[in-house]
Amino acid sequence: MQSFLDYLKSSGTPGQYGDPMWGAVWALIYILLIFTGISVAVIAMNWLERKILAHMQVRLGPMRVGPHGLLQPIADALKLLIKEDIVPDEADRVVFWLAPVAVVIAAFTVFIVVPFGPTHAVTDMNIGLLFMLGVSSLGVLGIIMAGWASNSHYPLMGALRSSAQMVSYEIAMGMAVVSAVLMTSLSSGTGTLSMIGIVRAQAEQGVWFIFKFFPLGLLAFFIFAVAMVAETNRAPFDLPEAESELVAGFHTEYSGFRWSLFFLAEYAAMIAVSSIAVTLWLGGWMRPFASWHGPKITMPGYWEHPELGAVDFAFSLAPAATFLLLAGLSFLGTVRMPRHPMFKIQKAGLAGFSLALAGIGVLLLVPPVRDTIQDIYWFVFKVAIFMYLYIWYRGTFPRYRFDQLMKLGWKVMIPLGIGVLIVTALLGVML
Amino acid sequence: MTARELIRKVLLVDLIKGLSVTFRYQDPREVYTEQYPLERPQVAERYRGAPRLNVNPETNETLCIACDLCALACPEHLIVVSSERNATTRRKELTTFTYDLSRCMFCGLCEDACPTDALELTQDFELANYTREGAIWDRQTLERGPQPTVYKG
């Protein structure tokens, strides 16, 4: 039991903890936390996507279930759970059942190596990045299984498109990733594929890889950013599920809970590839201007960390500030709600919600909590920017035609990726 | 492709323009949607909606003189006016007035025919009913007008 508590003082992931048994217990706790976190993020993302997309199209989005439609994802989930689960007569039942499971497993397994902070990862594999890319591309297997098992034209077409698209863009993605991995070897002489190691390399070199060898890092990041949209089948590369052409693509024949598994997996995969991008190019858990410390200020009480400067202190208030801002916004929503008895429950609910947000914000001001939450906050913040970008793209860009997609992948992205890789290698040798 | 076009393409100028447009439209003030039961739309002044039988605001007596011109003007013959001669004043007085909204096409010929401006097509548009019979309005309903649930207190 002592060993269980001692983990909190250790400075490693549960996978590296000396005591294997308690390490496994901590790993389980982490897995549960991450699984819940991702599920909540998917729910939040569902609401945010509908809201943001609606506002981009000068609509309002969900407004009816709960204040500003806040409970809409829950209503949707309930609807999906009680919906009839249809298996087509001609479908291959076993594969039809297995496909969504495979997709979900592939999407969630990758989170084992995602470093939310230097110690906040389930484990730190020395091949972490390879593991992540490998397992996340297993998702395409599930999609092909779904398309084939449905025994119907549209799903099969969608699955074929999806596999062709994923295979093409994986090459460009790989090139960009390798150029970032090359950069990790610049100061220490040995590169690393470990997700935590990559962020540490950026900390050592004092620069995020997106700004390294400007504009090379930016180019590699750009290639990855395009390829990851294609990889997750999102607009403008959503040909596998193009509504106007293929009904719903590979999940046309799926309904109810199985469909919601595909939905869950799609969003989990989006979060996963975004976290790869954040880890490789945007300094992972590091805050902006991490190498920049302000003048040391002294203040009685709080300063058990005298090494912290004013800038560090200012940045460490960001998580609390975010939650307090959200609380303020939802409180504003409460105040502006129409005065009518019909809105009584909604008003109370929204007020409670803003109180909860404010409570979290205040909790994040407590020094020990604030210091442990820092890295997680910045990581999630950067991933959230990517999530917003996904929605923004979807609200803006029209869908590519299939030949345009292939042309972009093979004639632009892959040569560019190879070029970036070669120049990075040359610069690495010369400098 | 000229050099200028090439640079535009490489720097993704068009894509960024599109992104900035969608970004600007996120302003909540740009929202065009009306939250219907909460916000009621402003219907055009000449809109012809629910019919109404006007009453004299001072005496609360109907303006209708039961002349039957509206019923004659109606191309659908959906107005039925019945009246009765008052024995003392020797004047025709309105007893019942039915208006079958389910057949009405809101052409407005009845209000044009009315010599006293008693019958009028108003800007009320909430005419939904649970039954077909509910669409046949009697004199009382016509004088009162439709009474939709009001959501804003």
Image: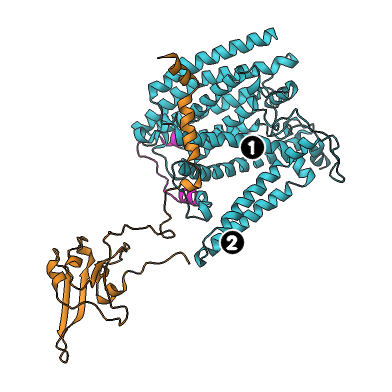
Q: Pinpoint residue A125: horizontal percent, then vertical percent.
A: 68, 26
In the picture of the structure, the residue carrying the numbered disc 1 is A380
Closest to the observer, B86 or B95: B86
Q: Which residue, given by chain and number where applicable, does mark 2 sit on? A: A348
Whole-number angstrom distance, CA of label 1 to CA of label 2: 29 Å
* Residue that extends furthest to the right in the rendered view of this protein: A300
Mark 2 surroundings: few (<14), some (14-19) or many (≥20) residues within 10 A: few
Q: Is residue A71 left or right of residue A154?
A: right
Q: Are marks 1 and 2 in contact (CB under 8 Å)?
A: no
Q: Position of residue B93 (x, y in %)?
A: 18, 83
Residue A146 vs residue A380, the one in the foreground: A380
Q: Chain of mark 1?
A: A
Quadrant the C terminus of chain A occupies:
top right
- Of all chains, the one bearing label 2 is A
Q: Which chain is orange?
A: B
Which one is in front, A270 or A155? A270
Q: Is residue B25 magenta?
A: no
Disc 2 residue type (three-letter):
Ala
Residue that lies at the very extreme toward the left in this rendered image: B72
The correct choice, above or below, for A377 with respect to B92 in the image is above
Label 2: state its secondary structure.
Answer: helix
Label count reads 2
Write the residue at 60% across / 11% down.
Answer: A423
Colour used to depict chain A in the structure image = cyan
Q: Which residues are magenta?
A: A75-96
Q: Position of residue B139 (x, y in %)?
A: 25, 76
Q: Residue at x 58, y 24 (%)?
A: A133
Farthest-out residue, bottom: B88
Query: Which is nearer the N-term, disc 1 or disc 2?
Result: 2
Is residue A172 at least partly visible in the picture? Answer: yes
